[in-house]
Amino acid sequence: MRPTREQAWDTLTRYTKSEALLRHALAVEASVGFYARLYGEDEELWRATALLHDFDYEIHPTLDKHPQDGAPILRDEGYSEELIEAVLSHAEHLAMPRDTQLKKALFACDELSGFVHACGLVRPTGLDGLEPKSVRKKLKQPSFAAGVHRDEVYAGAELLGLELDEHITNVVAAMQPLAGELGLRTAANAAQA
């Protein structure tokens, strides 16, 4: 069965209630969708995969369970092995090969999307005007968005064969249209304030 975005959103929202986790799923979806378009891939499949990559995190918040214990749930819901394998491959501790563009893009967008979101939260204009230089500067501050694995941000860009600045630019551009849904201010909001 070919997953739809609506189906993936339904699954995600049945298992995830946290606003922060839902926003993270939307940010990763936007970023992975950007790369699906860039590479001429199946955007709906890629977006569904991105939405579901952490769907089980609230019920399995530890590495001994997430995301591997979520895989049987996805199988029961009828999702394809391609989607399930991609979800599993985003977890560094499972050491699965990232041997498809989808797996590479999901891994590359996961941590960086979260980090870019954190950068947007502390700026009066959110993501508007956010430059790679500013993101790189924040990456060097271990206390900022401390939960983000910096090594995975760098490894993700390398996996895609991109310079970090180009990857940051792509992720920021992908997330900008969703700024409101992500709880971020925009230049327009800042001007009205």
Image: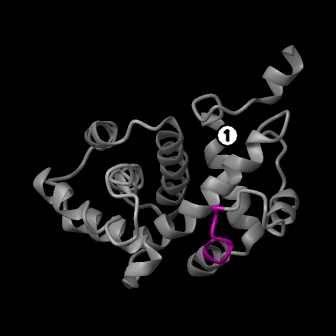
Q: Is residue 127 visible?
A: no
* Left or right: where 117 falls relative to 4: right
Q: Residue at x 85, y 14 (%)?
A: 192
Say which residue appears at 41% left-offset and 68% top-offset. 102
The amino acid at mark 1 is Gln
> Residue at position x 75%, y 30% from top?
185
Q: Secondary structure at mark 1?
A: helix
Hey, which quadrant is residue 97 in on the image? bottom left
Percent of width and height locating residue 122 = 81, 41
**Camera-nearest residue between 193 and 187:** 193
Q: Is residue 129 left or right of residue 98?
A: right
Quarter of the image for the C terminus: give it: top right
Q: Is residue 161 magenta?
A: no
Instruction: Give how far across and how far down residue 55 sits, in percent.
Output: 35, 50
Q: Closer to the camera, 188 or 92?
A: 92
Asked if 81 appears above or below 183 in the picture, the reply is below
Q: Which residue is mark 1?
A: 176
Residue 7 is situated, as x and y percent measured from the top left of the image, at 25, 40
Q: Which residues are magenta?
A: 147-152
Q: Quadrant of residue 155?
A: bottom right
Is residue 149 visible from the viewing direction of this image?
yes
Q: Looking at the picture, does residue 101 appear above or below residue 188? A: below
